[in-house]
């Protein structure tokens, strides 16, 4: 009580009455959904799975496997780097060029255009744009004579298939498959490769299939399921091709460097072997003594150590020479060389990674881009760092070599006791052995590099070839339809809710229950007639029956209490209190009760009009102002019912507020109660004047009349306040002007007859 809330039942009933609003709203929403589905280009999902293998699992001898004993590389593949590579626009540009995706053909239709992928009857065989960075849109209409008309930028051009046509945007050459009959215009769209490559990269989605795995899921959405499948297939193929080409470039650089070192070492080895041969011939030194052999064996062991150190120094010199020689170039550093320093190995690997990244960025961004300048500066800084590291490593190796050389010198000092020829021969054999070991090592690495180059395979494989869904992923027809139905229902529901929320007048009994706990004694239906009297002896209308029901309800509103005097008031004018007082008096008179109606509305009296009483005679005001006027002088008999008497107001007083306090009122009412069975006081609206409150001591009950669609909900607070403070005795409410349904039942109320009671009363 007292809360201004929305009643769900009331909301539903209101919605049912406005069913046509729901029908229109749903029809519009469904039509909009249909239009949305028809005009939206469907998108199909294409997906594929590819496995990125670790390099040591690729099935061939890789760079890392060739020199894994050197700790040159970490054998892990960075999946994030591979994902970035798949997103690169340079890779997408190759896909666009290979599949000619930047050339699109559409069948022009009423609702939307339909892509003609691989089934277009016309093809662009040559396009020379005036502005390479602008897209071209042209609508082609094939004529009956085999020529065509193309419309672009609101201009039309005539041309022949196979011939170059010059238009404002550039020069275009089209071909036509004449076996395909075309009776519709075709939209030709030509995008710059860079723009379409960016679009392709944005549309692509690459994700790791499962945590801890090296399987990547590639997904793309396209309006053609076949084109989406072809894009993923081509993207994977191009990615693997680029991966193989990068590996081959590294192997080729390694082979070139090894060949150069082999040529130099071969000359040195040949010279050393010839020196040994000449010495043996000169001194006939065909065998060494046992002691000489033992010393020679020890020297040989140290020579092997020195040889390994010299190999390391030679490799470092080679890398240093390569970096210095290509200081202004951006070439891959050979990595399949035997190094024992892990830090240097990681630096070389990082250097090659940055070289690869620069190659990709050069294609995507151009040489003058600020990012290119930054990465080239990074390459130069890393090159300097590697060179400095090589110099430091060479110093360490030189220290080690000097230590080994000193140990070997000690052994050689012992060899001085043997013949000079043998000692000289040992020295010459040692030098030859060093060169021979280096030569054999380089030959082995060259063969391994050649083998790896010839059988290079990508660092991955296709797990699941690309395939497209048979049904489009969007638009979701059933979802859009359901959403349209929901919107079509919610919009009118919201309107009804807002209407109910801001509707501040009484419409049904539930409105009363939410604002006041004063009981409802009955309701009076809306009268379609203009007659003031709706109750008569033989009347069977709904209005008369509701008054009879109200008469019966008076017995049960306040059980155990005698109700002889009834005050009828309202909160404002035009709520029908005088009408109800008049017909209530007739209803009581028809029940055999001698009834009188006293018009206490001294400001706007109505009973004389309702009872067809001509003014001129004496009335209530005359009685209250003139003690000579008696009760019998002011009582009028209703012409339709002898048992119903009326005391009209008479002339309107100058001060009705003071007149209502007259001492003759108690005398009047006491006399009337002695003579009449039932007394009705038609009082002015209590929400406007205080007159009814002065009559509270003379009545048994108080009827408050409220009118549907007229009385404001806020005015119910007046009734509740009177009831709470007991300003009037035994208050109850009667609802006036209630709408009836076809069966005669009061809509949304508890009183009256239902539709199954048809025939119990007549309808006006």
Image (spheres, helix red, strand yellow):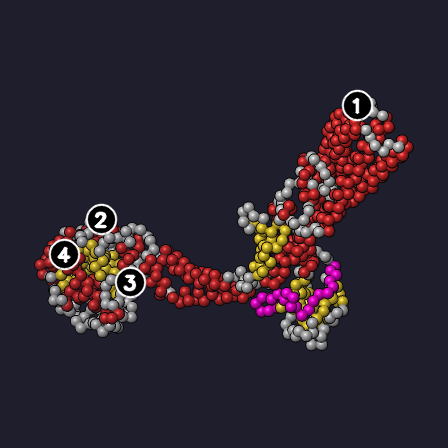
* Distance in Å between CA atoms under marks 4 and 2: 20 Å
Q: Which residue is mark 4?
A: 559
Nearest to the eye among marks 1 and 2: give it: 1
Residue in the picture at 18% in, 73% down: 538
Instruction: Give the farthest residue toward the right.
Output: 282
Could you say which is closer to the camera, residue 600 or residue 218?
A: 218
> Label 3: which residue?
748
Between marks 4 and 2 in the image, the one whose residue lies nearer the viewer: 4
Distance CA(mark 3)–CA(mark 2):
27 Å
Residue 20 horizontal side relative to residue 378, left or right:
left
Q: Residue 563 location in percent, x, y?
A: 14, 57
Q: What mark, if any, has residue 724 been given in the picture?
A: 2
Q: Quadrant of the C terminus?
A: bottom left
16 shown above or below 447: below
Task: Indicate which disc residue 414 carries.
Answer: 1
Magenta stretch, residue numbers: 108-130
Q: Residue at x 85, y 35 (%)?
A: 272
Between the residue at mark 1 and the residue at mark 3, the CA separation in whole angstroms equals: 128 Å
Q: Is residue 111 magenta?
A: yes
Along the polypeptide, which appears first: circle 1 or circle 2?
Answer: 1
Mark sitting earlier along the chain (3/2): 2
Q: Is residue 525 left or right of residue 434?
A: left
Q: Position of residue 617 (x, y in %)?
A: 17, 64
Asked if one can make out residue 141 in the rendered structure from this viewpoint, the answer is: yes
Q: CA distance from mark 1 to mark 2?
A: 131 Å
Question: In the image, residue 340 lies at what x, y percent?
Answer: 70, 35
Q: Residue at x 85, y 39 (%)?
A: 270
Q: Residues within 10 Å of mark 2 (few under 14, many from 20)?
A: few
Q: Foreground mark, 3 or 2?
A: 3
Residue 552: which quarter of the image? bottom left
Q: Quadrant of residue 585?
A: bottom left
Q: Are marks 1 and 2 in contact (CB under 8 Å)?
A: no
């Amino acid at each position: 009580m007292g809360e201004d809330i929305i009643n769900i039942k009331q909301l539903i009933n209101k919605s049912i009455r406005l069913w046509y609003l729901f029908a229109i709203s749903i029809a519009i929403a469904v039509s909009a959904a249909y239009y949305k589905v028809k005009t939206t280009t469907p998108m199909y999902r294409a997906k594929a799975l590819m496995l990125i293998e670790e390099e040591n699992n690729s099935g061939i001898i890789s760079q890392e496997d060739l020199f894994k004993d050197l700790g040159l590389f970490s054998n892990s593949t960075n999946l994030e780097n591979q994902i970035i590579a798949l997103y690169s626009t340079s890779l997408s540009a190759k896909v666009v060029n290979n599949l000619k995706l930047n050339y699109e053909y559409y069948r022009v239709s009423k609702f939307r255009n339909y892509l003609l992928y691989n089934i277009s009857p016309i093809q662009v065989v040559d396009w020379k744009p005036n502005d390479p960075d602008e897209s071209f849109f042209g609508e082609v209409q094939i004529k009956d004579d085999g020529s065509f008309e193309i419309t672009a930028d609101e201009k039309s051009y005539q041309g022949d298939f196979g011939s170059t046509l010059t238009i404002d945007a550039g020069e275009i050459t089209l071909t036509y498959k004449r076996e395909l009959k075309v009776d519709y215009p075709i939209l030709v769209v030509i995008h710059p490769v860079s723009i379409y490559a960016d679009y392709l990269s944005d549309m692509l989605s690459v994700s790791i299939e499962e945590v801890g795995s090296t399987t990547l899921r590639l997904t793309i959405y396209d309006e053609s399921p076949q084109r989406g499948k072809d894009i993923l297939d081509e993207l994977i193929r191009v990615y693997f091709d680029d991966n193989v080409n990068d590996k081959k470039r590294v192997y080729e650089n390694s082979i070139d460097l090894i060949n150069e070192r082999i040529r130099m070492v071969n000359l040195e080895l040949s010279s050393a072997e010839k020196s040994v041969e000449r010495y043996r011939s000169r001194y006939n030194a065909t065998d060494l003594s046992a002691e000489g052999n033992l010393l020679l064996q020890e020297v040989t062991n140290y020579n092997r150590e020195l040889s390994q150190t010299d190999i390391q120094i030679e490799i470092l010199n080679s890398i240093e020479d390569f970096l210095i020689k290509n200081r202004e170039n951006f070439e891959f550093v050979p990595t399949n060389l035997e190094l024992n320093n892990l830090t240097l190995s990681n630096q070389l690997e990082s250097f090659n990674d940055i070289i690869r990244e620069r190659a990709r960025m050069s294609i995507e961004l151009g040489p003058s881009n600020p990012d290119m300048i930054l990465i080239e500066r990074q390459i130069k800084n890393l090159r300097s760092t590697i060179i400095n590291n090589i110099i430091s490593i060479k110093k360490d190796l030189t220290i080690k070599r000097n230590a080994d050389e000193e140990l070997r010198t000690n052994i050689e000092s012992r060899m001085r006791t043997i013949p000079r020829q043998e000692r000289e021969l040992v020295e010459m054999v040692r030098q030859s052995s060093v060169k021979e070991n280096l030569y054999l090592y380089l030959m082995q690495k060259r063969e391994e590099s050649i083998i790896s180059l010839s059988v290079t395979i990508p660092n991955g494989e296709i797990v699941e070839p690309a395939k497209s869904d048979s049904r489009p992923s969007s638009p979701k027809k059933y979802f859009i339809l359901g959403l349209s139905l929901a919107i079509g229902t919610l919009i009118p529901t919201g309107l009804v809710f807002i209407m109910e929320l801001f509707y501040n007048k009484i419409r049904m009994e539930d409105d009363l229950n939410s604002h006041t706990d004063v009981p409802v004694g009955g309701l009076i239906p809306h009268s379609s007639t203009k007659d003031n009297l709706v109750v008569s002896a033989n009347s069977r209308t709904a209005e008369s029956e509701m008054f009879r029901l109200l008469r019966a309800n008076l017995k049960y509103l306040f059980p155990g209490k005698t109700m002889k005097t009834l005050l009828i008031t309202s909160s404002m004018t035009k709520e029908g209190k005088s009408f109800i007082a008049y017909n209530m008096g007739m209803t009581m008179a028809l029940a055999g009760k001698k009834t009188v109606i006293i018009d206490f509305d001294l400001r706007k009296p109505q009973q004389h009009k309702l009872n067809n009483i001509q003014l001129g005679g004496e009335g209530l005001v005359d009685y209250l102002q003139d003690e000579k006027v008696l009760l019998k002088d002011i009582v009028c008999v209703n012409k339709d019912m002898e048992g119903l008497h009326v005391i009209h107001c008479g002339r309107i007083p100058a001060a009705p507020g003071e007149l209502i306090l007259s001492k003759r009122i108690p005398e009047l009412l006491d006399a009337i109660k002695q003579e009449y069975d039932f007394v009705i006081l038609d009082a002015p609206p209590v929400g406007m004047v205080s007159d009814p409150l002065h009559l509270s001591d003379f009545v048994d009950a108080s009827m408050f009349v409220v009118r549907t669609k007229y009385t404001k909900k806020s005015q119910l607070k007046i009734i509740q306040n009177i009831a709470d403070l007991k300003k009037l005795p035994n208050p109850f409410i009667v609802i006036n002007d209630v709408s009836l349904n076809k069966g005669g039942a009061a809509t949304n109320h508890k009183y009256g007859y239902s539709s199954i009671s048809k025939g119990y009363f007549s309808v006006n």
